[in-house]
Amino acid sequence: MILRPLRERLTLMLLALLPFHALLLTVLTKMIAGQGHAPLPWLAAWKEGVLGIILVVAVIEILLISRKRLAVGDKRLAIFSWDFIDLCIISLCILGVVISALHSSLSALHSLLGFKYDFVPLVAFLILRRVEWSDRFRDRVLKVIVAVGGIIAGYGILSYFLSQDFFVSMGYSDLHSLYLPDSPIAAFQQIGASGMRRIQATMSGPNQLGFFLLLPWTLGLLNIIRGERWNVWIPYFALVDIALFLTFSRSAWVAACAIMIVALFLEVGAPFMKKILWGCLALFLVATTILILFAPKIIIRSASTSDHLVRPLRAVSMMLAKPLGHGLGTAGPASNRVSDPCVFLPFGADIGWAQNRPELCVFVGEFQAQPRDRACNCPVLPENWYLQIGVELGILGFILYVLLIVLLLKRLAVSGERLAGSPAASHYALIAFLVFLGVSIGALFLHAWEDTAVAYTLWILIAGILGNVRQASKL
């Protein structure tokens, strides 16, 4: 069938280009609209367009396969064969639409952005797990991840030393560490007043880069544990590891530690190399402890840490205040897109740097210092993906989403055993499980699924493995 090769090629192209989206969008926007222009929406929509074509091809495949099965009397139609994972996703989508419809004050933009961030990856998974993925695709997609991960890690390390003027010339903002909806993105963030950069390479932020790098990082880690070509994989792993460290994304660090601990307990690999990696993990923890003691601003970051404590509590309060939910787009990255850009500073902070940017809302403590002629509408950022879903879809939506993640982790954990007859498929399944576990842990502290490079890549990867498991077990 010609449709499957077409779908797989389009998917490989999409996954290869997604990590470069923010960089390409910034450069192309400057070329088309000039310096200082916000990313062009129609240009940014290319990824949804390509994904849409992939899904249309997949739906056609499902219909053709179902028709062939009907012709021979086979009643196992993929389009009507559901399990509890599918029902969770369908229920979440229906719940999101119904709750948003009940809130007439919500704009269509709120609902569309909320659906995009919350449900598009889930709908893609729902459809793509119902088509076959070849061993050749699995082999190629891992090679794409390795190549793209190495390029991005190398560029990210280099970007640590490049001047801000260089980034401005490419079309980035002349500010750092701030997100302004109507302006270009910043090229990097800084850790408070330390002047130390957090790299983001080709992506839209350091946390997004950190979560994406978990993919090539995990792939390199597993190959080292298995004793695969150490002279190649150890330098590669070190390159990605340095880039991951320079993101200073504590959530991505926690996710990486969790992945490494689980991987080292697996009954595969060379015991000697496992001992070395245990030592590396211990060394990282010691180094982190030293940084906490002697350079607390780098790790502790009191303002950021306070947000990670206060904002989830506010999200819980919002859930309890409206147990049925506030509607799609009212929290998380969608809220960030449709709200005022807000900066929160401690008491006594100087706001002189912001006075030439009247669109920026500046708070000193609890006092709104700028602007003074209107009340600001700040985004709702719970710093927790699960609580974000809870704010939008209520307590029921929160429970369904957590249940979905638990079911997927459980299914992925046993998928390698079901595919033990194919070492390549089993290896692919293990990578998907470990990275999905890491990002799911990171989602406890950040909006880990907001970046399309992370979300689309991972949900497509697990569709490629759970779809085959589904067929193998005749579910």
Image: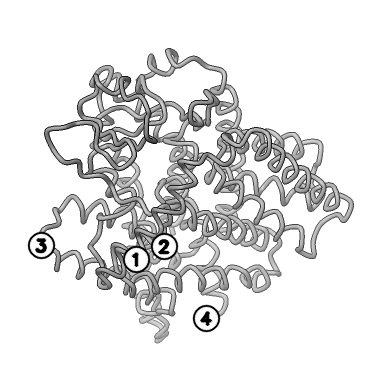
Residue on which the image places disc 2? 386
Image disc number at residue 390: 1
Residue 270 in the image: state x and y as whole percent.
Answer: 85, 54
Residue 251 in the image: state x and y as whole percent.
Answer: 55, 48
Spatial separation of the CA atoms under disc 3 and disc 1: 19 Å
Which of the two discs, 2 and 4, labels the residue nearer the N terminus? Answer: 2
Q: Nearer the viewer, residue 46 or 61?
A: 46
Q: Residues within 10 Å of mark 1 (few under 14, many from 20)?
A: many
Q: Are marks 1 and 2 in contact (CB under 8 Å)?
A: yes
Instruction: Tell me the quadrant of the picture where the N terminus can be found.
Output: bottom left
What amino acid is labelled 2 in the image?
A: Tyr
In this picture, residue 18 sits left or right of residue 135 = left
Report the residue at 69% width, 45% height from top: 220
Q: Are marks 4 and 1 in contact (CB under 8 Å)?
A: no
Which of the two discs, 3 and 2, labels the residue nearer the N terminus? Answer: 3
Q: Are marks 3 and 2 in contact (CB under 8 Å)?
A: no
Report the residue at 31% width, 57% height from top: 56
Q: Nearer the viewer, residue 59 or 310?
A: 310
Q: Quadrant of residue 295?
A: top right
What amino acid is labelled 3 in the image?
A: Ser
Residue 312 in the image: state x and y as whole percent.
Answer: 41, 58
